[in-house]
Image: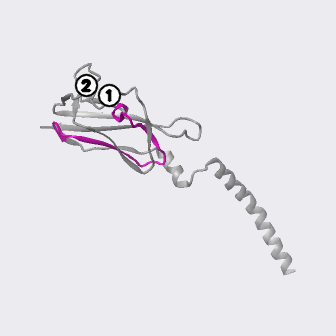
Amino acid sequence: MIYKRFYLSVFVFLITLFPMIHSLSAQAEDDPLPKEASEDQEKGPDLKLIMDKTYKVGDKVTISMENKSLFAYLHNKKSPACDFSFSNSTEEEFLIPQAKGCDVVVTTAIKPKETKELFSWDLNQCPDGDTGCLKGEPLPEGEYTIAATFIAENLDDAGEERFFDVIATFRIVK
């Protein structure tokens, strides 16, 4: 008699547990990423330009990208400065000597949790309309913005491309 009650209790327990297990497995199929990854995806990827906030006229700058996301993002390995736009405080865009050869695109990925040096720059600009300048003119004192849009190496779960904009501002002083 005791065994019958025990088996009956186990049977009832399993019957009530089965719908919960089935519900959890269906939810896991809908969301294949681990919980941590799912939360990060909702917040969006985290790409950051690594550079100082202040430079002196004529300083050499190294622009690096830190990828804190779970996704690899592509950049132009051949001419990385071509991925960026440069502007002054009045939002006038200008070209830099390193942004030449933009018609040749060789992409490589900045992997998750990786920091990669993209290019070096002497804080100079090409004269107006000169797209292939070799040396350029030094940027005067002022505030400047560097911006780019990066695309993820792989599509998201819905088959859509994943983009991320990065923007950094810096100041040039004497």
**Outermost residue, bottom side:** 2
Q: Amino acid at mark 1?
A: Lys
Q: Is residue 92 magenta?
A: no
Above or below residue 8? Residue 63 is above
Write down the region rendered in magenta: 55-82
Calculate the distance from the C-alpha at mark 1 to the C-alpha at mark 2.
8 Å
Which of pointers 1 and 2 lies earlier in the amino acid sequence? 1
Q: Mark 2 highlights which residue?
A: 133
Say which element carries label 1.
loop
In this view, the residue farthest toward the left is 174
Residue 136: give its label: none
The quarter of the picture where the C terminus appears is: top left
Q: Horizontal and vertical percent for residue 124?
A: 21, 31
Q: Is residue 49 above or below residue 126?
A: below
Quick check: 14 left or right of 141? right
Picture residue at 75% right of the left edge, 60% below the top: 18
Q: Position of residue 38 (x, y in %)?
A: 54, 50
Query: Residue placed at 44% from the left, 36% from the top?
Result: 107
- Decide: few, some or many residues near mark 1? Use Cα within 10 Å; few <14, some 14-19, many ≥20: some
At x 52% / y 35%, what residue is drawn? 161
The image shows residue 43 at horizontal and vertical percentages of: 47, 46
Residue at position x 81%, y 68% from top? 11
Label 2, residues with CA under 10 Å away: few <14, some 14-19, many ≥20: some
In this figure, which residue is indicated by the disc labeled 1? 100
Residues under numbered marks 1 and 2 in contact, where contact means CB atoms less than 8 Å apart: yes
Of the pair 14 and 56, the residue shown nearer to us: 56
Q: Quadrant of residue 103?
A: top left
Looking at the rendered structure, the secondary structure element under dot 2 is loop
In the rendered structure, the answer to whether residue 103 lies left or right of residue 95 reads right
